Image (cartoon, grey):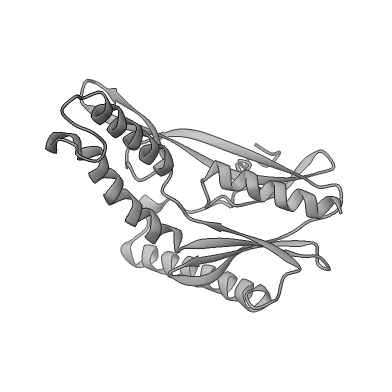
Amino acid sequence: MDEKGQVESAFWNGVVEDKPELDKLSKEQLRELWEKEEYEKNQRQEKLNNEWKDKVPDDMIMIRDEIQYSRYVVLGCTALYLLMTISDGDASPISPLQEQIWPLVIVALLLPLQFLTSRQYREVRWHDEEMTAVIYRKWGDCFVASATKLEQGDELVLNSETAWSDDGFHDVTSVNFHDGSHASRKHTNYWIEVHRGGQRHDIFGDDWHNKRQLLATIDFLQQKISQ
């Protein structure tokens, strides 16, 4: 909290603007507020696209979307299938019993889903003259997710926040039951922070919760900064 009593944002070097209490607004006021936020969001997106979408980068890496932990599910099901069929004298991996093929069914369902998911991707683009990292997103439509100005000596740091949620539409790592019936889900959000002069200067990638892919992004951009 700063001297004016405003709460510092969890992500930005600034403060959270005072916002009206939503439960005290009329439906018309809520609609106007939503329309204003959507308009501002679309304006920011249009500006990013116009400036960076078609600009050719000096270097880039492509990172495809993935179903998290899918590779472990495939490996686990394959290993389980082999264990079940090899240890059974009445079966083999080539001629399994009917009740032994369910691990292969899971793999057969998961692989096409993973293939379709991988058609969506991000490009981490580096523009050397501007010292700018651009995240280009192909997700149905194509758009620029962020453009972050960097400087020599900047340090990129992966940060995260873990919280409990009731909605169940997050990266679920565990489930906890309260009062014997209500389920709360634990999810972890990841983002990249730009540290400059020992202080957090900016963030990006906060809509991208794949830890492994964000670490790959940091490695790529840190090499560019240090050149």
Residue plotted at (27% across, 50% down): 109
Q: Compared to 179, does 2 lie above or below?
A: below
Name the residue nearer the viewer: 76 or 114: 76
Tell whether 53 sits left or right of 100. Answer: right
Residue plotted at (59% across, 70% down): 44
Name the residue nearer the viewer: 210 or 45: 210
Q: Position of residue 160 (x, y in %)?
A: 57, 37
Tell whether 73 sits left or right of 37. Answer: left
Q: Position of residue 173 (x, y in %)?
A: 41, 32
Count of numbered circles on the image: 0
Residue 212: name its quadrant.
Answer: top right
Name the residue nearer the viewer: 106 or 7: 106
Q: Compared to 134, does 206 lie above or below?
A: above
Judge whether residue 207 can be spotted in this image: yes
In the rendered image, the quadrant that contains the C terminus is bottom right
Tell whether 182 sits left or right of 190. Answer: left
Residue plotted at (45% across, 58% down): 118
Residue 190: name its quadrant.
Answer: top right
Judge whether residue 13 can be spotted in this image: no
Residue plotted at (65% across, 40% down): 158
Residue at the top extreme of this rendering: 180
Q: Position of residue 129 (x, y in %)?
A: 83, 68
Residue at the left extreme of this rendering: 98
Q: Position of residue 178 (x, y in %)?
A: 28, 23
In the rendered image, the quadrant that contains the N terminus is top right
Q: Compared to 159, does 45 lie above or below?
A: below
